[in-house]
Amino acid sequence: SAQILEVETFIPMLLQSSDQGASRLKRVMFIGDHHQLPPVVKNRAFQKYGHLDQSLYARFVRLKTPTVDLNLQGRARPSIAELYSWRYKDLGNLANVLTDPRYLKATPGLSYEYQFVDVDDFDGKGESQPMPHFYQNLGEAEFCVALFMYMRLCGIPAAKISILSTYNGQKSLIRDVVRQRCAWNPLFGEPSKVTTVDRFQGQQNDFVIVSLVRTAHVGHLRDVRRLIVTVSRARYGLYVFGRFGLFENCFELAPAFTRFAKRPRQLSLELKELTPTSERACGEASPDATLVKDLHHMWALLQDRMKAQFQAAASVVASAQGTATT
């Protein structure tokens, strides 16, 4: 209810059938999160001066109406939840995320459960704007898709991976890169969803890859509600690609980026982990971890991994054929 217009809130109330001329409506309950994105109002004048993007839910919260607040989360690893729990009062964790091995063990092939990967200009270019307000960043798009392909080689199902962006232009570009690089190959397939952060509000997935796009200005990610949506969609793994130096200086985003800063700003991979499970504890990188220097390095590592897996598969097939012949 925090994401619908005020006037829309009254529609279900007015549609209640009457009982002998009197409304049967006795109680109304609002369930939502005013710390996430509000209703979408495209007209900036109405949005800014008319406050039409304020939901009735948010109005009641602003007027100090008593609320019952969520104080436990059961979606994400506790470490990922720390990226957004600062925004909520006394937000703790349910027992399942503290005891379930899926939340306690590391993801095979990846050193950390969350990272901010600092992406420099790709071929001398950062963000671009082929048309007004249609922001794109080719380096980040290629990096996101390369990580998706690597995760697929690690055995993570495509349906468990989503790629998000903060701009429609980047969403379109990532879809183009996916079609070109991997959609045609059954070994990789396509991510569960390639969409914008705004569209993904209210949804979740095991692994989420995010492209922040901008390299010149922070843009609309300065709205802390959009940041909360961005970092709260993943269960087991969150990997954000962007220009760290740009966003770390933004006051509104500081609590989350202070936590990101504690991890390496280069993507850390566990190339020697070839099994579908890992014995490492969540958040612990091995001494053999490989830091990805740049996009070219990532593609080289990805090609080596593909070659090794193809050779291993060929050896298994040859061994099986030899046994059958014998």
Image (cartoon, rainbow, N blue to C red):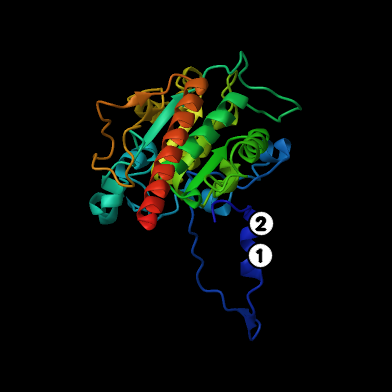
Residue in view at x 41 percent, y 55 percent: 67
CB atoms at circles 1 and 2 under 8 Å apart? yes
Residue 285: image tag: none
* Front residue (pair 66, 32): 32
Say above or below: 115 vs 11.
above
Q: Is residue 220 visible?
A: yes
**Image quadrant assignment for residue 123:** top right
Q: Position of residue 37 (x, y in %)?
A: 55, 44
Placement of the N terminus among the 4 image quadrants: bottom right
> Could you tell whether 79 is left or right of 62 in the image?
left
Name the spot of residue 5 as percent of width and height, x first: 63, 52
For disc 2, the neighbor class at 10 Å (few under 14, some 14 to 19, many from 20) is few
Q: Could you say which is closer to the camera, residue 43 or residue 271?
A: 271
Give residue 11's mark: 1
- Residue 232 appears in the picture as rendered: no
| Crowd around label 1: few <14 · some 14–19 · many ≥20 (10 Å) | few
Residue at image location 61% in from the left, 44% down from the top: 183
The residue under label 1 is which amino acid type?
Ile
Q: Position of residue 325 (x, y in %)?
A: 39, 55
Q: Residue furthest top?
A: 124
Q: Which residue is mark 2?
A: 7
Q: CA distance from mark 1 to mark 2?
A: 7 Å
Where 321 falls versus 27 (above or below)? Answer: above
**Residue closest to the far front:** 326
